[in-house]
Amino acid sequence: MPFPNDFVWGAAAASYQIEGAARADGKGPSVWDMFCKKAGAVFQNHHGDVACDHYHRYREDVALMQQMGLHAYRLSISWPRIIPQGIGPVSSAGLAFYDRLIDALLAAGIEPYVTLFHWDLPLALYHRGSWLNRDSSDWFADYTRVVVERLSDRVKNWMTFNEPSIFLGMGYQTGIHAPGDRLRFAELTRAAHNILLSHGKAVQAIRAYTKQSCRVGFAPAAVGRIPHTDSPLDIVAAKSVMFGSFEKSISHNGLWLDPVFLGEYPKGLLDAFGDEGPEILDGDMTTIGQPLDFFGINIYAWERVKAKADGKSGGELVPYPVGYPVTALGWPVTPDALYWGARFFHERYRKPIFITENGLSLRDLVSVDGKVHDPQRIDFLTRYLAALRRASEHGADVAGYFQWSVMDNFEWAQGYRERFGLIHVDYQTLARTVKDSGHFYAEIIRKNGSNLPDLPLSAI
């Protein structure tokens, strides 16, 4: 069986990870430019100054996307490339780059899906308090207006934030990502609330300034759990852990999803936060809960849970066995996550589902025949996409899939060690080589997934 006829096949990347041109044409520094200058913060002191040089090579990259038959490309806008200080004067050169990129995509028959924030906060705004400053929601709304006024005559699909739980948790709680802070919990919930306000005000700005009918979504990294079996008890246990087991954590789905899609924080979550929860002013939840058109979700590896033996609510973790397959980053290979993720999120939030990121890191290299053979990525794609197709067949409104990533790139604190791409990048010469998986993905797109095998869940 194929996917729905209007299914969107795409790939994704983020501005700081691929663009390079860190100081070109008046671009301002981001928190990642700052963080990469901190000795030892990034693997072997790698940085994104050049990255894949997409800023100068975008035409070549778009041609390769077209060669793979992509319907869509999920890109992010670099805020400091548009507004170097985060607020104030706008860079005409920065906007012109995205003009050229969007025009090239459309000329190639590729629909741009634009993410407004994928982690590269202007450094000047970090110096003003970053997301701890409630004014950040107005800064972000103003930036959104500038981008939408310029690009919305051609861009129809928008996402506000990418994975706020990750950039907050790893950047401001553990300090292993930019900006490298380790805040106490009360400041984390304050920042989370301001990020959610920023999301809501950005949605309002998109609706107010768009030049054509558009769709607006969100791309969180939700905490997911796979039922150990398809028994009703294990399914209930997985849902309970995902949506009803409240703890003092800034990763909980109730913090990032319920306010956006249901208009409120769960009471149980606020109770768990106690006096370290966010200050909620009149009108905040209405602002945050602006209506959205789709639910984007980034899914990689999820844990399994089963119902508790004593019959109590919640679930208990089922560890993966010794020798279970993992990626180069050590993440378990869990195709079932796409099946249960699409089902659970569609059932709870009743929006069309886009898988906005999914992929794996491998140690790819150019072989002596000049090609990049990555059979594990082909196997990964086969398993995960078969699971996603099954979710569609079982009633989930699955609208599209974006493979992470369109090309190898700067993988944050891991530098250039991890390779997620469908396209191999030689970081010395910047030569691009479409991997075997890129050719395989092109064939899946051409046949709309009808060439995928029927695999049972847990087919590892």
Image: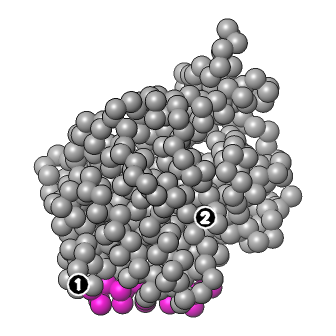
Residue 94 in magenta stretch: yes
Q: Which residue is mark 1?
A: 89
Magenta span: chief secondary structure:
helix
Q: Label for residue 292?
A: 2
Q: Residue at x 28, y 42 (%)?
A: 187
Residue 216 in magenta stretch: no
State left or right for residue 15 relative to residue 80.
right
Q: Nearer the viewer, residue 256 or 451?
A: 256
The alpha-carbon separation of the residues under discs 2 and 1 comes to: 30 Å
Residue 134, given in percent of the width and then of the height, sits at 30, 58
Q: Residue at x 71, y 50 (%)?
A: 346
Question: Sequence-wise, which precedes: disc 2 or disc 1?
Answer: 1
Label 2 environment density (alpha carbons within 10 Å; few <14, some 14–19, many ≥20): some
Residue type marked 2: Leu
Label 2 sits on a secondary structure element that is: loop
The N terminus, quarter of image: bottom right
Residue 57, given in percent of the width and then of the height, sits at 38, 81
Q: Nearer the viewer, residue 385 or 151?
A: 151
Label 1 sits on a secondary structure element that is: loop
Q: Nearer the viewer, residue 389 or 315?
A: 315
| 438 vs 321: above or below | below
Q: Is residue 135 visible?
A: yes
Residue type marked 1: Pro
Residue farthest along the right direction in this orientation:
1
The magenta segment: 91-110
